Every structure is written in C-alpha cells, then in structure tokens.
Image (spheres, rainbow, N blue to C red):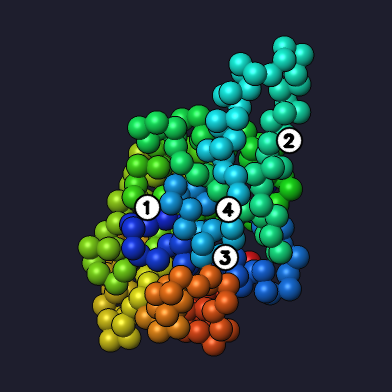
Amino acid sequence: MGKVIAITGKGGTGKTAVTAMLIRHLKNSGKKFRILAIDADPDANLADALGVQVGKTIGDMREFMQDSRFTASPDTDKQALFEAKVFEILLEEDGYDLLVMGKPEGSGCYCYVNNLLRAILDKTATDYDLIVIDTPAGLEHFSRKIFPELDDLIVVTDESRRGLTTGERIRDIAREMGLKYKNLYVIVNKITTVRREKVLENAASLGLEVIGIIPYDESLAKFDLVGDPLMGLPDDSPAVQEMVNVIGKLGL
C-alpha cells in the first residue's frame, strides 16, 4: 500500500474542498501518481467537488452482495463475483480512481459497508501510490477503524480557537481508539490575514502542527456558490497556491 492520507474536520470547514484541491494539483502536476480517492461521506460531496457523476457506490454493492446470498447458484464463485462488483463501482477518472461509500444500511449503520470497504482495499490498495480519504464530518467515524494505520491525518478547521480545539479532540480520540498515524497536521481554512499570527499562537498552545493556512478566496467562494467542480479553479487562486505549499510539505 502507498501513502494513506485521511482528511477530516467538522462540517462546513472545507475538508472536501481541501481534498479536491489536493487531487486537482496532483492530477495536473505531471507526476505519475496512481491515486485512489475515497469519498467516505454519505453525502458524496467529494464526487461533486471533482465533477464526477456517481454511478454505483459501495452501498449499492452491499445490497447486491446481500441479495446474492439468496439468488446466486450454490456453485457461484463468490470471490470472482466480489471482484467483478469492485470494478463496477470503481470510477476510473483521468489521473485518479474514485470510490464512493454511499448510504449506510438502515438506521445509519455502516458495519457491512465498512467491511466491504476494508475488503476492497485489501484487494486493490497495492495498486496505488496514494490513497486520499475524505472522511465524514464529525468524530464518531474514527471508531470504525477502516484504516488500521495512516501516514497523515489532516484536520481542517476554521480560524477560531474553538475550531482548533477540534484538532486537539481528534488527536485525543484517535489515540483512545488505537488509530495509528505517523503525522497529525492542521490546515486552517478561510483565514483572514490579520488573524494569522494569533491562529498560529493558538495552535502552538494546543500542541498542533499547522501545515497550511488557506486564505479566504473569492474565486473558491464563487465556485462553491454555483456548485462548479473545483477542478476548474484557476492556478492563481490563493487557495490553490496554498495547497501547492501544503502538498510540498507532505512530500508529494
């Protein structure tokens, strides 16, 4: 398996935009990265940000695999059936592949869907140099332990101290859950220039390493307003330029 990066944060902080801009830059960089993007949010916002039309999801695969227990003949090769469905839901885009989690099974339970995702990764992860996961908003998903070990856990937050404490809580919860990661970084999004130094001071007091400070970007705001894919952001966008710095610090 290649490098694994999970991007998390509270709803509305821009974690999906950060994920999309990371993929945008690597896709356009000319580097021959084999990238798997995973949209683990049931709202499938990453696909929208990338401009990808979602066909079938892991949730759809769950329904098929469960139904096949009753409809498939006894001599059906279950492993071959599983592999065929994996390639059916894997969206092969220019410069990256995309897996979309989709909706959970009844009452918000992700048990079977998570098991399917683990099995898919066991089968395909070695085919990629980089796996990027856009996680659901909030903290509860860490208990699912889909990824036993991460290289980089990136927390996207706003400029408030209250927002930065989310990074502190995520760090503590990840430790409590036994989630292994090599690095935990913070990206502060939509920041105003006059508050930059105070934000860095607050982050340092919480023991958090800030790897990126993304300024408020009017072009990004306009793209979000009309729902245009972020892959079309101009290269001179302040947000895009800061993400280039972040990607360099990640060693990509």
Q: What amino acid type should be assigned to the residue bearing mark 3?
A: Gly
Drawn side of residue 132 relative to residue 188, left or right: right
- Which element is circle 4 on? loop
* Residue hosting label 2: 84
* Residue hosting label 4: 54
Mark 2 touches mark 1? (CB < 8 Å): no
- Which element is circle 2 on? helix
- Mark 1 and mark 3: span between their CA atoms? 20 Å
* Residue hosting label 3: 51
Q: How many other residues sit within 10 Å of disc 3, few (<14), some (14-19) or many (≥20)?
A: some
- Of labels 1 and 3, the one closer to you: 3
Q: What amino acid type should be assigned to the residue bearing mark 2?
A: Ala
- Residue 143 sits above or below residue 170 on the image: above
- Of labels 2 and 1, the one closer to you: 2
Extreme left residue here?
162
Q: Please tell me in which quadrant of the rendered image residue 235 appears.
A: bottom right
Which of the two labelled residues, at mark 4 and mark 2, occupies the earlier sequence position? 4
Which of the two labelled residues, at mark 1 and mark 4, occupies the earlier sequence position? 4
Drawn side of residue 15 relative to residue 195, left or right: right
Pinpoint residue 133: horizontal percent, then vertical percent: 53, 53
Which of the two labelled residues, at mark 2 and mark 1, occupies the earlier sequence position? 2
Q: How many other residues sit within 10 Å of disc 1, few (<14), some (14-19) or many (≥20)?
A: some
Extreme top residue here?
74
Q: What amino acid type should be assigned to the residue bearing mark 1?
A: Ala
